[in-house]
């Protein structure tokens, strides 16, 4: 190369900070660690426990298995698990009253985990869909729509039930108006002021929830859809109003769901509110990854770790992922 040709290049060559591993590691803007990951877990009893066909590698866990899994997750550096119950059909009702059973599956699961691994945080879902015959997140009115205010009354009682069982965090996922404020009020009133609320603040009426509904047994039961209470995938400004409302009502953390198709929402929420923000890599995202990996179209580790890193880059402080355990294992081994 002549001196003249060399002078045509800029003094700032951006590739200089990419050329060696040491400098790439030092200037990397976004980090991923096990403490950024939350593992969702399905808990079941009897013959409801077992593998989930539409979520390869994921199972509904019996209580003893759940406790063992939580021990393993904590050892890998994961700080928080999210519980989702699988309820027998004979305990499902139109009003979801089993959600208020102090001796029900979720309270017993909370107590078992906290007894075995007290340092592990336990988050529980606040919604009625696992408990209702119709598969919706609340009580239905005469027209078959979810009735907001009576549903909120049940949700506040459900949250209190789980707080009494020892939950560290409750996560209302129902998308009812005003539910965060009502849950915060009842927790304060009854002496559970330190229980955290992670609100599913921007939960979209997404087609990516199918495998989850298989997992909790609501697919065949769901009557209609959830578009009259979950958000329209076309909207972004509305998500900011939802988040603002939940923060004003006392949410400690906010969540965007689904994850990867909604990274623009994650980014806007984090920039606008500077709140602890979570994103959920939902069952459909997981199933797509597993299908592509199973067919040899994607490298499992590379694709997964890139996806999780992108959540973090978009602004997510925390990521719920069915791959959390595997990712934490890779991070611990230094293979990520």
Image: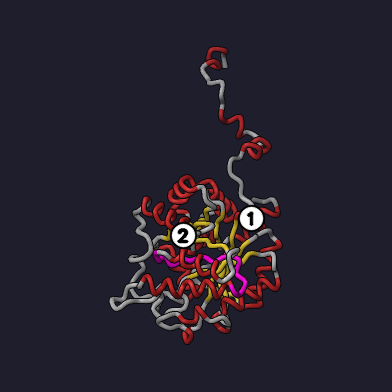
Report the number of discs.
Answer: 2
List the residue tagged with mark 1: 35
Q: In which quarter of the image is residue 209?
A: bottom left
The answer to whether residue 16 is above or below residue 287 is: above
289, 310: nearer the viewer: 310
> Is 44 positioned to the left or the right of 212 in the image?
right
* Spot occupied by residue 246 in the image (x, y as percentages of width and height): 45, 58
How many C-alpha atoms fall within 10 Å of the one at disc 1: few (<14), some, or many (≥20)? some
Q: Quadrant of residue 1?
A: top right
* Spot occupied by residue 193 in the image (x, y as percentages of width and height): 58, 65
Disc nearer the start of the sequence (1/2): 1
Q: Residue at x 52, y 71 (%)?
A: 159
How many C-alpha atoms fall within 10 Å of the one at disc 2: few (<14), some, or many (≥20)? some
Q: Does the magenta stretch include residue 167?
A: yes
4, 62: nearer the viewer: 62
The answer to whether residue 212 is above or below residue 336 is: below
Q: Which colour scheme is used?
A: secondary structure
The span picked out in magenta is 164-177
Q: Residue 277 carries which label?
A: none
287, 87: nearer the viewer: 87
* Spot occupied by residue 41 in the image (x, y as percentages of width and height): 57, 69
Q: Disc 1 versus disc 2: distance between alpha carbons?
A: 27 Å
261, 319: nearer the viewer: 319
* Spot occupied by residue 186 in the image (x, y as percentages of width and height): 51, 70
Q: Is residue 101 magenta?
A: no
List the residue tagged with mark 2: 249
């Amino acid at each position: 190369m002549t001196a003249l040709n060399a002078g045509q290049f800029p003094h700032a060559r951006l590739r200089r900070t990419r050329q060696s591993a040491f400098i790439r590691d030092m200037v990397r803007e976004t980090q991923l660690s096990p403490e950024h990951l939350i593992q969702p877990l399905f808990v079941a009893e009897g013959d409801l426990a077992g593998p989930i066909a539409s979520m390869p590698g994921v199972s509904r866990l019996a209580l003893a298995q759940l406790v063992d899994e939580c021990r393993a997750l904590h050892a890998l550096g994961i700080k928080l698990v999210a519980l989702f119950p699988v309820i027998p059909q004979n305990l499902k009702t139109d009003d979801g009253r089993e959600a208020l059973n102090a001796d029900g599956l979720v309270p017993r699961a909370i107590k078992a985990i906290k007894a075995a691994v007290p340092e592990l945080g336990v988050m529980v879902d606040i919604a009625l869909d696992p408990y209702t015959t119709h598969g919706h997140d609340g009580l239905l009115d005469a027209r078959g729509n979810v009735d907001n205010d009576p549903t909120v009354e049940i949700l506040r009682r459900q949250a209190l039930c789980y707080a009494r069982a020892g939950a560290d965090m409750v996560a209302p996922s129902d998308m009812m108006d005003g539910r965060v404020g009502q849950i915060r009020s009842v927790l304060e009133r009854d002496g559970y002021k330190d229980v955290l609320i992670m609100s599913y603040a921007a939960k979209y009426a997404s087609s990516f929830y199918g495998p989850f509904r298989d997992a909790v047994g609501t697919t065949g039961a769901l009557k209609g859809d959830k578009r009259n209470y979950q958000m329209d995938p076309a909207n972004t400004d509305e998500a900011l109003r939802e988040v603002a409302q939940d923060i004003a009502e006392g949410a400690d953390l906010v969540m965007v769901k689904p994850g990867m198709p909604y990274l623009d929402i994650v980014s806007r929420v984090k920039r606008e509110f500077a709140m602890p923000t979570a994103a959920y890599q939902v069952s459909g995202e997981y199933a797509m990854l597993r299908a592509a990996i199973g067919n040899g179209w994607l490298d499992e580790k590379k694709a997964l770790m890139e996806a999780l890193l992108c959540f973090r880059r978009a602004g997510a402080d925390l990521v719920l992922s069915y791959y959390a355990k595997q990712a934490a294992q890779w991070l611990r081994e230094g293979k990520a």
